[in-house]
Image (spheres, grey):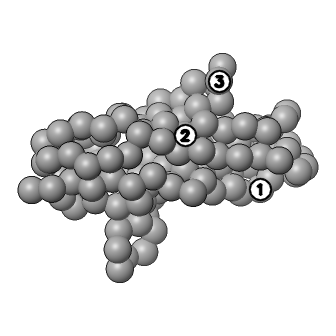
Amino acid sequence: MVQLVESGGGSVQAGGSLRLSCRASGYTYCRADMSWHRQAPGKEREFVSRVDADGKIVYADSVKGRFTVSRDNSDDTLYLQMNSLKPDDTAMYYCETQRNGGFWSPNCPDNKWGQGTQVTVSS
């Protein structure tokens, strides 16, 4: 069974930093993009950043220059280094995988979400 487990969330003051991690397990022979999304209370879930299966990186405009995403394929972990945090960054942060080529299998699903990790930034 595939799993995504996020960690690293917490409470910080504006201007502070946090580093989120998303550990993927159970994936076998799977080519997938890995992304971060977030959802603030009362708002829709929004895209934050992605590292695709080829290593191409994309950021939302709202986090460019402040957040850095990285992916360690040796231990199937996605990271998000968040600097210069603002109160508007307060949200539940979710990790997602999306199959990119290859074939579906129980160990390579089309799409998978983690349970999320809470980030709270106070002013």
Would you say residue 93 is visible in this rendering? yes
Q: Is residue 15 left or right of residue 35?
A: left
* First reached walking from the N terminus: tag 1 or tag 3: 3
Amino acid type assigned to the residue bearing label 3 in the image: Asp
Residue occupied by mark 2: 22
| Tag count | 3
The picture places residue 23, in percent across and down from the top left corner, at 60, 36
* First reached walking from the N terminus: tag 2 or tag 1: 2
Which of the numbered marks, if any, corresponds to residue 75?
3
> Tag 3, which secondary structure?
loop
Amino acid type assigned to the residue bearing label 1 in the image: Asp
Q: Based on the displayed image, in which of its 4 quarters is residue 62 positioned?
A: bottom left
Amino acid type assigned to the residue bearing label 2 in the image: Cys
* Residue occupying image coordinates x 63% and y 57%: 113
Q: Based on the displayed image, in which of its 4 quarters is residue 69 positioned?
A: top left
Residue occupied by mark 1: 110
Give the distance between the C-alpha atoms of the residues marked 2 and 1, in whole angstroms: 18 Å
The picture places residue 61, in percent across and down from the top left corner, at 30, 53
Give the distance between the C-alpha atoms of the residues marked 2 and 3, in whole angstroms: 10 Å
* First reached walking from the N terminus: tag 2 or tag 3: 2
Which residue is farthest front?
A: 11
